[in-house]
Image (cartoon, rainbow, N blue to C red):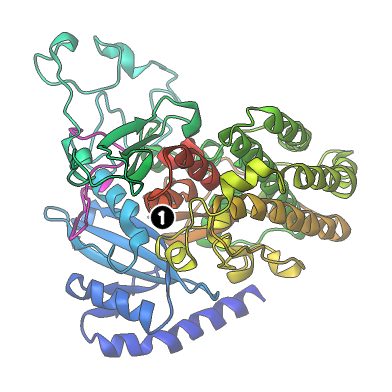
Amino acid sequence: MKQVKEAMTENETERTLDPIEEKFPGSVTRDERAGYEGYIVGADELKSFARTIRDDLGYDYLSSVTGVDYLPDEKMEVVYHVYRTSGGPALVFKVQTTRDSSIVPSIVDVYPGADFQEREAWDLLGIRFDGHPDLRRILMWEGFEGHPLRKDWREPFFEADVKPFKSRWPEGDVHRSENLNPFNKNVQYPDEFTPEGWIPEGEKNLYASLGRIDHKSTGNGHDVETDQLVVNLGPQHPSTHGVFRMVVTLEGETIVDLKPVMGYLHRNHEQIAERNTYLMNMPFTDRLDYICSMSNNFAYALAVEKLMDIEVPERAEYIRVMMAELTRIVNHIWAIGFLLNDLGAFFTPALYAINERELVLDVFEAVSGSRMMCNYFRFGGLARDLPEGVLETVTELVRERLPRKVDELDTYLTDNEIVRVRGEGVGVLSAEDAIAYSAGGPVLRASGVPYDVRKADPYSIYDRFDFDVAVRYNGDVYDRYRIRIDEIRESLKILEQVLRDIPDGEIQTGKPQYQVRVPAGEAYGRVENPKGELGFYVVSNGKPNPWRYHVRAPSFINLTALGIMSKGQKIADAVAVLGSIDIVLGETDR
């Protein structure tokens, strides 16, 4: 059945897109490389191509922009995944350029959601996007030397391209690279560097991107003369949910402009992953959105399973869905509790929410041995079956405890005067802007766009379950709170069906392996994570380590619209707007 569906999808794509090749003769060709899909577009026609597929073919949602360094071929490639918000599979297109002059047209004016993703590709791979309105580094700092995802970039005390390092295994000579540096840091220092004499490079580009500041403004609209000033919220601030910074231009207390600044927690997750073996990366995905490790495992497993062309046993599929939906409940309860923190109800609602989360983490600990970093999924199945008593525990949670507690949250919070005053009409994101800026998850659906990957492009066994796509229509902080309550109830509905239908049987295809063979090719695996679409783009060259591993992180991409959501709001509202997006910095910064 799976092969039939895939064949239908491929034929449908061919029927739909053949006119594209006719419209762009010679500049748009099919990607004929073995294991690859989509189209290769000439750089000169990229913007025209993007407008055509958006306006004429309905591919209105840009999901992912990925840079790839093909060092042996001396070329760079940018890979785009676009979808229709009405549903259906991806259209994949690519543009190629030389490594020594990596310049590609920006498509931010066609798909504004490309903004941060193009900056990331420039920062980490050195691909310059011509015409980008604000092409600055985004994860590394201004003044950083080189582009660390290029295949020929080497960090100080570089040891080897791939793991396991021979010094560790089989030789057993374990040492820390930091110990080889007189400053005890794995960092390259310029000649004659001294900490006392170092002057950090300024942030002129950041402040310049805010535009000209008029110190004598026309007032705030209420006959009060005000000045414009720039205020930094974070990165060390409890309201920013981690080491995250908002540079805000204010006129009085009204936000004129806002620029998110991130990267303080960046650790080059993707470079680490490209040195790891495929299986080594599974626990690394736990540490992206560390609230949602089970779902992170899910997306990565799907990408590699596509490359390996393997099926997952029925029982394992049901358990995967069970863990993913319990994760959604955990995330949304946590998000609601901490949003109330941001609104001023410091920690009382959060503690009630955390209590319910702990009960679900008991289940995760029982099945995986860990409460947060679960490392539970495997290619072709799961690490182990459910232990005795877990189904009974989940049944009690799903049918008794969680519905009651969600109803309590709804009762106490939804009509609370402070929640409504601080949420209604604040941080509004229209449906059109939500799509244009590539928002995902509750942020997208609270703006009136009923797009959910589980329905729009079903994966695993989600097409078997009866549930509704939760949607709200005001696009404000209040609706982003309410939609999470709605989604918890839909997750409980799915879990009821899982508990009813879960079969006995195997939980792993073939024997468990410490090393897997992954055929050459590319694959994009995506899931509807609690915060939005989480995707993994993986390129294999047939060797034990991925050639390219890229994370489409919803916490990162959802921040693209933070500026337009905050303009015109009061400074105190910026905290509420950020809280309603629901980010985790481990995933944002990677």
Q: Quadrant of the N terminus?
A: bottom right
Looking at the image, which residue is at 37% across and 81% down?
55
Q: Is residue 574 visible?
A: yes
| SS assignment for the magenta stretch, majority | loop
Q: Nearer the viewer, residue 246 or 512?
A: 246
Is 175 positioned to the left or the right of 473 in the image?
left
- Residue 59 appears in which quarter of the rendering? bottom left
Is residue 359 covered in magenta?
Answer: no
* Residue 166, placed above or below residue 545: above
Q: Nearer the viewer, residue 411 or 93?
A: 411
Q: Is residue 302 visible?
A: no
Inspect the image, locate mark 1, and give the three-letter code of the amino acid beneath it: Ser
Looking at the image, which residue is at 9% across and 18% down?
191
Is 50 positioned to the left or the right of 538 in the image?
left
**Residue 414 at what x, y percent from top left?**
71, 48
**Residue 120 at what x, y percent from top left?**
31, 48
Is residue 140 covered in magenta?
Answer: yes
Looking at the image, which residue is at 56% across and 35% down?
342
Q: Which residue is mark 1?
A: 540
Q: Quadrant of the C terminus?
A: top left
Give SS at disc 1: strand
- Residue extent of the magenta highlight: 124-144
**Residue 81 at what x, y percent from top left?**
41, 66
* Residue 439, placed above or below residue 331: below
Is 430 positioned to the left or the right of 21 in the image?
right
